[in-house]
Amino acid sequence: MVTESNEANLASSSDGTGIGVPVKRHPYYLKGLDHFDWGIKDRMSRIFDRTSGKTVMLAFDHGYLMGPTSGLERLDLTIEPLMEHADCLMCTRGALRSVVPPHLNKPISLRSSAGTTILTDLNNECILDAEEAIRLNASCMAVMVAVGSKFEALTVENLVRTADRGSKYGIPTLGVTAVGKELVRDSRYLSMASRVCAENGATFVKTYYCETGFESVVNTCPVPIVIAGGKKLPEKEALELAYNAINDGAAGVDMGRNIFQSDAPVAMIKAVRHIVHNNGSVKDGLDIYNTIKNEA
Ligand code: 5RP
């Protein structure tokens, strides 16, 4: 084992050229990605903070299947003030081009699958061209995967095709385990859906938190997991959700409605950040939320 720093080794090498000094290695800091390619790791490092190893992604891609849902009627008014506080923005190409200032230079999780809306059967989807992700400088391509639904095969194929193109161009693939009335969000289902995403090429997985057995969902998924927030909850419960998920091993959150539908969205995203990046308690998170809300 090398115990001295490389500089010390170099200084002590006989001729200062480094002969005999072991070459410095850079073990990768995210679970399961040691053997992935350079471009994938570079982009993942933009999404996940190098110090905490975690991420707070702001999801506002809901319009692609829900239309102008509550809080997303005017993305320029509600989402733009939140952007600077997120580690990564998850959105469609439409929202990206309309409201995300390119000079913000935020990593983008590009919603890369689209199809049916809430008016019909969800998850009958196609995928975007990878060239579009390259053009938009996306840090990852997010694809819905509906294990157990009638569109299971189609959505797994969408993931496989996206991961193929992602490997070709060095762009990570985010497997998003689908929502749907017929899909039960228990640890058995979430473990299976997350694992299917990872085995089929997802670089990381977005899924839901479950109160029982989430540790096992994380444990059996070989790549990082981030959780969606789901429907709007009272702020304390949403912070508890983030806290419990991080405590059980999640590598971050990809949260939408519990931030942008909050009555103090900036306060809420700052409180979530404290929990995710600083291992903060729910009480401290709630204090941050109330303090910033009352100042405003
Ligand atoms: C929509 C999505 C959303 O990005 C996801 O559900 C996260 O948002 P929320 O925290 O509101 O659930 O994948 O299809």
Image (spheres, rainbow, N blue to C red):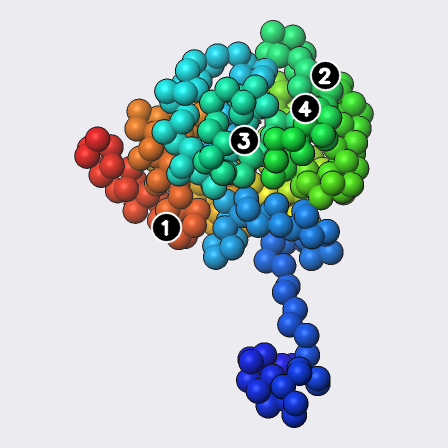
- The residue carrying mark 3 is 90
- The residue carrying mark 2 is 124
Residue at image x 37%, y 46%? Answer: 274
Q: Nearer the viewer, mark 3 or mark 2?
A: 3
Badge 2 or badge 4: first in the primary sequence:
4
Badge 1 or badge 4: first in the primary sequence:
4
Distance between the Cα atoms at labels 1 and 3? Answer: 24 Å
Q: Residues within 10 Å of mark 2 (few under 14, many from 20)?
A: some
Mark 3 Cβ and ligand 1 under 8 Å apart = yes
The answer to whether any part of residue 212 appears in the image is: no
Q: Where residue 222 sits in the image (x, y, percent)? A: 68, 49
Quarter of the image that includes the N terminus: bottom right
Residue 280 image label: 1
Q: Quadrant of residue 79?
A: top left
Badge 4 or badge 3: first in the primary sequence:
3
Residue at image x 71%, y 44%? Answer: 170
Q: How many marks?
A: 4
Quarter of the image that includes the C terminus: top left
The residue furthest left is 295
In the depicted view, which residue is nearer to us: 240 or 81? Answer: 81
